[in-house]
Image (spheres, rainbow, N blue to C red):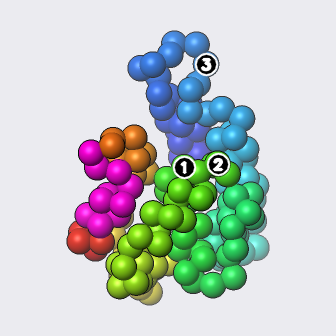
Amino acid sequence: YLLSLVGVMCGLGGAEATRGSLFLDQSNGEMLMAGIAVLQHLESSSPASIYWTFIADRAAALRLPFDSLDHLAFARLACLTRARRGDVTVLQSEWQRLSRSDRNTLVRHFVADGISTLAFSFSFLPLYLANARRNRAVGLHRALLVLVELI
């Protein structure tokens, strides 16, 4: 599975270039390696612990706090939007534009494990968010509002 995932990540953006990988650059490669590093603890840690360790590591790399459910949900959103350090301020601004109720809906969704707490799987959510960010007519704020409505 991991090998196929790496192959998919290498192929993202393949329509724009035929030499190398546009998506799996140094920054995204570092994220991939961090994910593989936490997976090495599968025999000694729970899946939830491994997952949230990865999210906390990504938050730390983006210089985001990760000491509350709200912070972890925002860090997960940063992962889903493929945010880099330069994107954090805009992402935080879009997050704050949401009503408290909408943020609470997203927090509940982003911290749900799908086992003990109901969660929905949106297979192409990162692509949806990336495309919405690039589309001036949609933008991240509207994309998040639609996501709230779907949840």
Left or right of 77, for residue 41: right
Q: Which residue sits at x=66%, y=32%?
A: 25
Residue topped by disc 2: 86
As shown in the figure, which amino acid type bears the numbered disc 3?
Gly
Residue 76's spot in the image, x, y percent? 54, 66
Magenta stretch, overall SS: helix
Above or below 128: residue 24:
above
Secondary structure category for the residue under label 2: helix
Residue topped by disc 1: 82
- Residue 125 visible to the viewer: no
State the separation of the CA atoms marked 1 and 2: 11 Å
As shown in the figure, which amino acid type bears the numbered disc 1?
Arg
Q: Which residue sits at x=54%, y=70%?
A: 74
Number of residues whose C-alpha sits closer than 10 Å to that of mark 1, classed few (under 14), some (14–19) or many (20 or more): some
Q: Which residue sits at x=70%, y=74%?
A: 65
Would you identify the image quadrant in which residue 151 lies? bottom left
Above or below 9: residue 112:
below
Left or right of 4, for residue 29: right
Q: Nearer the viewer, mark 1 or mark 2?
A: 2
Q: If you read the primary sequence from the N terminus, does the residue marked by circle 3 or circle 2 appear first? A: 3
Would you identify the image quadrant in which residue 42 lies? bottom right
- Residue lying farthest to the top in this orientation: 18
Q: Which residues are drawn in magenta?
A: 137-146
Number of residues whose C-alpha sits closer than 10 Å to that of mark 2, classed few (under 14), some (14–19) or many (20 or more): few
Q: Are marks 3 and 2 in contact (CB under 8 Å)?
A: no
Q: Which residue sits at x=36%, y=79%?
A: 99
Residue topped by disc 3: 20
